Image (tube, grey):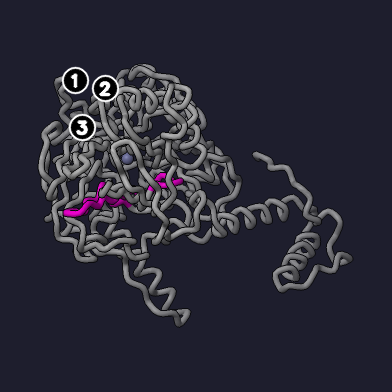
């Protein structure tokens, strides 16, 4: 009982994956991801790691997504010089993604510091810089799926295809101690049955399983690749009929390439109206190049992404000037711009100029974390705030879940059952609380003992035996126990301001609007509004949302 598992991310939320294994002779991290979502969660990215970075001997990386890899440069900046073990595909994708993440942080901090200077506040440092990201890449060592390697004294590891994105893997960790242990970290798992990715695999017979539960409470109807393409074609036809452009917030890696390959196919075979397609994301363009070089699929016997070359119909927009040129386009065209959850990148600029237009369509695809603009749009809010402007949403907002790289509840249960016998615990991580408990219910129905299912909280540690995992008294919890906050005052503020706008719009005249604003002003100043000054229809009674 001398191995400890600490869970430093993806506990009660889907971001910041980071697991730490400590044993007498070594400390190993599995993933080192960035927190995304609400500002409270994102704030954790700026805090020091809750462990001694210099004690870490090796990092094992499941895949390139930023919520799994995004704090690696911060680790390097904090003094980590050991190896980062990953597949070659993950390595190549990390090269473009970490540089991009660093660039975003440098420019965000630059903006913030200009504001801080004006307000007389001290300046802040970026979490890491492009230079830190470059240094991090020097630490990568490539592994091959299925090969067992020594990663640290008394720790061996083997990567199994996870079918989630290019290069993605589950990692089996073998701990050679007085009590030897075999652990399996699922990483993010794919759906299986895809023509772009092989089905997820994994060993059977582990002591403890640490698995994701992103879609633990949802089941999607299984779709063949052809059914998926015909649903996409249907969305394209409807967007074309609405008359304006189609904006697809792009998850730069995997989903963008799969969507693009399918888009080109349905346009080429005439099942959807042909359009100029603009890939407006330097990151997605660079990632696409990785897919062109590393996307070979043994199942397909070819590279299914080979059509993704810039040409007549498909344009790659690299510079901000090329991107700004899209403002002048009229009529039917398709823009894919990052980020997929609309919380950063060029998509925000396009949302700002298209969301108010009733002829435009926004096609969300894939999981939208609570607290992101994408989630607000998916939930049907009528007002959003982008780059300081309040915008009334009139565009058609559509969501398709068919390109999700994530296994659904049925896939997850099935995958877990195939890992049996599982001698000890099954940790359900990387899910919002409802998803993790939804998956716990399914697994219990499938025969797993309830008391072997663990839903850990952030920074919780467990002493691992072959069948037991005793929770240790927390010493370093960065957030109060309980579910990680997914919404915070920033979201509440945006919602309140949106609601105020709705009410102002609904009032009869400007005098009524001034009276309502005066009432609000008094409330803000701390004094109760003098009701005689507030006209009756300006009282805070519900105003129905209108779609006009
Ligand atoms: Zn992922």
The answer to whether residue 24 is left or right of residue 470 is left
Q: CA distance from mark 2 to mark 3?
A: 19 Å
Whether residue 62 is in magenta: the answer is no
Residue located at (39% from left, 19% from top): 223
Residue 514 point in image, percent of width and height: 76, 65
Residue located at (45% from left, 34% from top): 451
**Quarter for ligand 1?**
top left
Residue 28 point in image, percent of width and height: 22, 51
- Disc assigned to residue 195: 2
- Disc assigned to residue 385: none
Q: Earlier in the sequence, mark 2 or mark 3?
A: 3
Q: Earlier in the sequence, mark 1 or mark 3?
A: 3
Q: Quadrant of the C terminus?
A: top right
Residue placed under numbered mark 3 in the picture: 160
Q: CA distance from mark 1 to mark 3?
A: 19 Å
Residue located at (45% from left, 82% from top): 120
Magenta region: 10-33
Q: Earlier in the sequence, mark 1 or mark 2?
A: 2
- Disc assigned to residue 300: 1
**Where on the picture, by quarter, is residue 285?**
top left
Mark 2 burial class by Cα count in 10 Å: few <14, some 14-19, many 20+: some
Residue located at (77% from left, 66% from top): 519
Please count the marks in the image: 3
């Amino acid at each position: 009982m001398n191995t400890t598992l600490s869970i430093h991310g993806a506990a009660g939320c889907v971001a910041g994956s980071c697991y730490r294994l400590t044993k007498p002779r070594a400390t190993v991290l599995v993933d080192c991801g960035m927190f995304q979502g609400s500002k409270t969660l994102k704030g954790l990215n700026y805090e020091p790691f809750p462990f001694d970075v210099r004690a870490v001997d090796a990092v094992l990386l499941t895949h390139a997504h930023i919520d799994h890899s995004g704090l690696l440069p911060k680790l390097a900046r904090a003094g980590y010089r050991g190896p980062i073990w990953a597949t070659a595909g993950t390595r190549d994708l990390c090269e473009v993604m970490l540089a991009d993440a660093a660039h975003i942080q440098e420019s965000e901090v630059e903006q913030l510091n200009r504001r801080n200077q004006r307000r007389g506040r001290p300046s802040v440092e970026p979490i890491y810089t492009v230079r830190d990201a470059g240094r991090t890449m020097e630490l990568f060592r490539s592994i091959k799926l299925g090969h067992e390697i020594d990663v640290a004294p008394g720790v061996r590891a083997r990567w199994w295809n996870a079918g989630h994105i290019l290069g993605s893997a589950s990692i089996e960790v073998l701990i050679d101690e007085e009590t030897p242990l075999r652990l399996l970290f699922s990483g993010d798992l794919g759906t299986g049955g895809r023509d772009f990715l092989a089905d997820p695999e994994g060993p059977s017979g582990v002591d403890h399983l640490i698995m994701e539960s992103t879609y633990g409470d949802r089941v999607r109807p299984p779709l063949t690749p052809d059914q998926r393409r015909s649903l996409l074609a249907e969305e394209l036809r409807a967007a074309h009929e609405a008359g304006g452009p189609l904006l697809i917030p792009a998850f730069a890696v995997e989903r963008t390439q799969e969507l693009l390959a399918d888009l080109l196919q349905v346009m080429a075979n005439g099942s959807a109206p042909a359009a100029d397609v603009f890939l407006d994301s330097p990151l997605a363009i660079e990632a696409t190049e990785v897919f062109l070089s590393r996307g070979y699929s043994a199942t397909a016997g070819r590279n299914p992404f080979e059509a993704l070359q810039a040409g007549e119909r498909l344009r790659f927009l690299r510079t901000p000037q090329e991107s700004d040129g899209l403002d002048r386009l009229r009529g039917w065209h398709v823009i894919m711009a990052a980020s997929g959850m609309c919380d950063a990148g060029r998509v925000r600029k396009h949302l700002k100029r298209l969301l108010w237009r009733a002829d435009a369509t926004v096609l969300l695809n894939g999981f939208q974390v609570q607290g992101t603009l994408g989630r607000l749009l998916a939930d049907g809010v009528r007002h959003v705030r982008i780059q300081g402007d309040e915008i009334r949403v009139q565009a058609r907002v559509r969501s398709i879940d068919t390109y999700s790289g994530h296994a659904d509840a049925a896939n997850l249960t099935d995958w877990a059952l195939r890992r049996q016998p599982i001698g000890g615990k099954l940790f359900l991580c990387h899910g919002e609380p409802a998803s993790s408990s939804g998956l716990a219910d399914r697994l219990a129905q499938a025969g797993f003992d309830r008391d072997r299912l663990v839903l850990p909280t952030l920074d919780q540690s467990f002493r691992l035996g072959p069948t037991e995992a005793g929770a240790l008294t927390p010493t370093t919890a960065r957030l109060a126990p309980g579910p990680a906050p997914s919404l915070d005052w920033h979201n509440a503020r945006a919602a309140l301001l949106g609601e105020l706008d709705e009410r102002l719009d609904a009032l009869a005249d400007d005098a009524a609007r001034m009276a309502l604003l005066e009432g609000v002003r008094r409330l803000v100043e701390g004094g109760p509004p003098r009701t005689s000054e507030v006209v009756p229809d300006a009282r805070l009674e519900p105003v129905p949302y209108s779609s006009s």
